[in-house]
Structures are given as C-alpha cells and as structure tokens.
Image: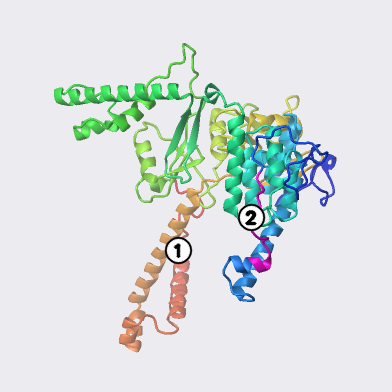
Amino acid sequence: MAAIAEPASRRDDASAAPGPAAPGALDPASASGVTADGTLPLDLGMPRPRVKARAPLTEDSLVSRGGLEPASADATTASRLLHAVQEDSRRHALHLKRLAAFHVAEDDFEREEHTLAVAIALRTTTDKARRLILDAHIAYTEMPRTLERLARGEMPVEWHERMLHATRDMTPFRRGEIDERIGAWDLASIPSDRFFAELRTLVAWCDSRDAAPDPVQSRCVELEKGFRDDGTASLRITGPIPEILALARRLDSSARSVQAAQRHAVRDGAPIPFDLDDAVTTTGRALSLATLRYAIITRTVLDTAGVEVPAPRYRVNVTVPALTMMGLADTPATFDGRTPIPAKLARDLAAAEPVWHRVLTDPVTGEFLPLPAERYTPTPAMVEHLRLRNASCAVPGCTRSTTDDAETDHIHEFDHEDPARGGPTHLANLHRLHFGHHDLKTAGHIDPVRHPDGTTEWTVGSPPLVSTRVAPDRDLATPEMAGWLMEQWDIHRADEDWKAMVACGEVDRLMREWGPAYEDFGDPPGTAELLAEVAEEEAAKKREAGIDQPPPWASAPPF
C-alpha cells in the first residue's frame, strides 16, 4: 500500500479557494459581459449567451423533472443521488488542488520525482499521472472560476473533465476566456445536453479564430493497440492529405500490379511474388488487394536514404506455455512479455521459427528461475532473463518497454573499487529501467531495495514522498497450467480410490444396502464421509507400502 506526502513547499490550506482570478474577471454570478472595473472585454466576438435553466434544480424540482411521486422511495433515492453528485464535485476539486501542488514547470528530476510519486499513490501509470498533474495545474491556475463552481458542488465532475479535455490544446489565453464564460453559466441547474452543446460552440469558435495547425507538423506514425488483447494492433499514419493520398494510391497501384503478377504466375507455374503464408500456392488464387497492401507494406525494404539501420539489439520473445505449444491447452501466450496473443497465433509463430528457447519458471508461482552470474557486466543471457522479468520498466507505474531505451541497473550499487563490498552482478540484484528513471535513481531521487522474498520496495523523493512494495513479475500462464495439472492429479487420485472401493467390495455393499435409491438418486447421506474414510485407509496402505508419491511437478519444474 502506498502512502503519499504532499510537497512541503507547496502545501496549502485544503479549504482555501482556487488560484486568484485574473484582472478584469467576471463575477461567476453575473452574465452581463461587463468586467469588474466597468470595461468591456477586448474580444467581443466570442459567444456570450446567458446559459440559464428554466427553473433552478432543487430537491422539489428534481421530483417534478423526473416525474416521481413526492415523498416516495424513488424520490428519496433521487435526492440522495443529487447530493452524492454534488459531494463528488467537492471532493474532486480538492483532489485537483492537491495534484496541482505537484506541478513543476521545469523539466528536471523534481518533475519526474513528483510524477512517479503521484503514479504510485493513485495506482496508475506515470503517463496518466503526468497528464493528471498538468490538468490539475491548468484547472487551478488558468481556469479558477470553473474550479470554484466545481468546489461548490455546482458543476459535475464529468462536465469539468470534458471541459479540460476540450481545451487541453488551447493557449492559456483561450482557456481563460472559456473559463470566464462557463464560470458565469447556471451550472447548478442546466441539463447536461445544454452544457455539452454550449461547450462545443465555444470550442468551435476558438478553433475558427485561432490559426489552424500546419498539416506538415502533424506528420507521425503511431502504434495503436486495441482494447481487447486479440493478437492484433494498428499502425496509424498521419500527415498532410496530399501526401497520405499519394501514399495510398502508390500502395493500391503496387497491390494491383502484384495481384496481376500472381495470376500470371499461377497460370504459368512460375514463382509467386508476395505469397503471404503460401496462401496463393495452397489455394491457386491471387491474394486480395487488402492482403497484398499489407504484404507490400510489411515485407518491403524501408528507404532510409543510405543511413545504416542497426540490427535489433534483442530478439523478440514470444513466451508460449508448453501445453499450449503441444495443442493440449489454449492458454494465451505473451508477445515480448507485454501483449497477450491467442494460442493459435502463438503456435503458428513458433512453427515458423527454426530455434526455440526453453524458459524455466516456478511450477506454481510462475516466477522466472534465475541464472548464475559473477561479474559487473551482465551476460547476454542475464539481460534476456531480465527482459523476461521486466518487459516494462521496473519502476512502478512506468509502461515503457525495456527492449530499447532501457538499461540494466544494480539495485544495490556495484562497488567498482571493491567489488566484494558492493552489490553483486546477480539476477537477484538487477532489474531493467528506462534510461530516464535510471538517471533518476543514479541521482538519488528514487531508492529501490530488493527483499529476500523477491519483492522490491521503492522509495521516491528526498525527503520521501511515497513508498510502495512491488512483487516480481511472473509468467501468468504457469499458475494456470499448474492448476490444471493439480486438477488432473486429483481426478486421477479419485479414480484410483474408486477402483479400490470396487476391488474391496465396498461399492457392492452400498448398492445392496441402498438399492435403486443409491443408483438413481445419487449418494445416500453419509456417503461422502464414507468415501473419505475409505480413501484415507487406502492412502495409508500406499504410504506403508512406499508407493504413494506426490505428483512429479510438486518439487521441480515440469519442463
């Protein structure tokens, strides 16, 4: 369990109001458009409607709006829900105020330290923690009017989050304008559809007035994973429309040319180009255009204008349980230790590889069994093992992969002058860290301690801001396989006990004593106890004879 302390330099009274309003700010209760000093805003073009409800939202009007019977159970429940929403808003405003205290403008160690502390405390990733801190800072310093309405319980949490998301890419000036307008709305009573419609109007107005982003600056290629771990992913290419359309036309033209070549090759018995998974050879038909576009874009050489691209530093691990590999189970495999993939896809990938690497895990917990080492520089085998154990950076909440931009770190620092006194280069004293977090540890801002049971205790900050204890990564398929094996062992033992009862005549005795009732209606009262007694007697006989042995996987890895 993590405990977090607010930075001492940023502590404030929890009941204090949000940050000071900007000069010339509107009174939230006013919608006249006139500033406090009697002047008009510089920008008169921005929409400034009087966003008001037809009637205030109170407990009585809530009953009327919902068509509920006054003083009924439903009316009471609806009233409680209204108060709960208001209380959630107050708590969320306080939550944002506390998060805003962790904001650091400079991109330095303190900023990463605070991000990591918040991620551990909120049980989330460092990327999300970084965004939450920034949103809280914006809400507290640039949009204080709406934060104040949130703190009063007049603005639902969903509305406030939607507003922050919609204005995230705007300038501080534009966010201040929107905060001024929305802060003057009748937020305590207007319905949600009215709020979202008015918010879209404001955002659209700002987008139309501000300079449109240069499409050239939007060039990027991003890997996107689906919400389901079904073994698929997407590669999104974004850029100026002319360039993307030209790429699409070139890809389509190439696919049509290859498709025609495949048809001619099938007809003439010639070698078939781009025969993905030998599908054309098997079916005797050319691939579809969609399949060919994929084959061309994934199997052609990327043009890097003569720049030499280094070979991959590590192999990509696809960890497949042995039973899945043999087709005896469909437990999912994991791709590079991070992404589950279906059993069939894992078997297909394994079938195409000339070399398999055996990885031993604890037969019950799934912990990867270590390999010995006695030097400062980890061996390639040790690094591969660490990548199995830490597919992501070992720092709690960090989701960065350790394939690239990661370094092997000694938890207990290695003493180069006296190796016997420093931390050993042993798997129990090593983990993989993203280079940024490795620098953070080297600078003394995070301190991991590895305990004998394999868990790692992380302390963040100096003085400490948060501490947490993390168990080692494990192969999640191994416990499932071990459970399946134990279940089969129990079935085998029960079958052996039943055979013993048949052999000693106990089943016949029960049949004679209970007759059809035993056969037709299941076990008579006391049968379970009797069976347990007979099983124990048989087990005692086996122990005396020295033939009763535990399952072979109870003391050693099965593979």
Quadrant holding the C terminus? top left
Q: Which residues are magenta?
A: 49-61
Instruction: Identify residue for label 2.
Output: 190
The label on residue 548 is: 1
Task: Report whether residue 397 is seen.
Answer: no
Residue 112: x, y in percent?
Answer: 71, 34
Disc 2 residue crowd, few under 14, some 14–19, many 20+, Cα 10 Å: some
Q: Is residue 484 above or below residue 407?
A: below
Q: Are marks 1 and 2 in contact (CB under 8 Å)?
A: no
State the residue in front, 385 or 115. 115
Question: Was residue 14 drawn as part of the magenta stretch in this picture?
Answer: no
State the residue in front, 51 or 373. 51
Residue 360: x, y in percent?
Answer: 49, 42
The residue at 55%/35% (across/down) is: 387
Earlier sequence position, callout 1 versus callout 2:
2
SS state under label 2: loop
The residue at 43%/72% (across/down) is: 538
Query: Which quadrant of the view contains residue 40?
Result: top right
**Is 47 displayed left or right of 336 in the figure?**
right
Query: Which quadrant of the view contains residue 500?
Result: bottom left
Q: Is residue 540 above or below residue 37?
A: below
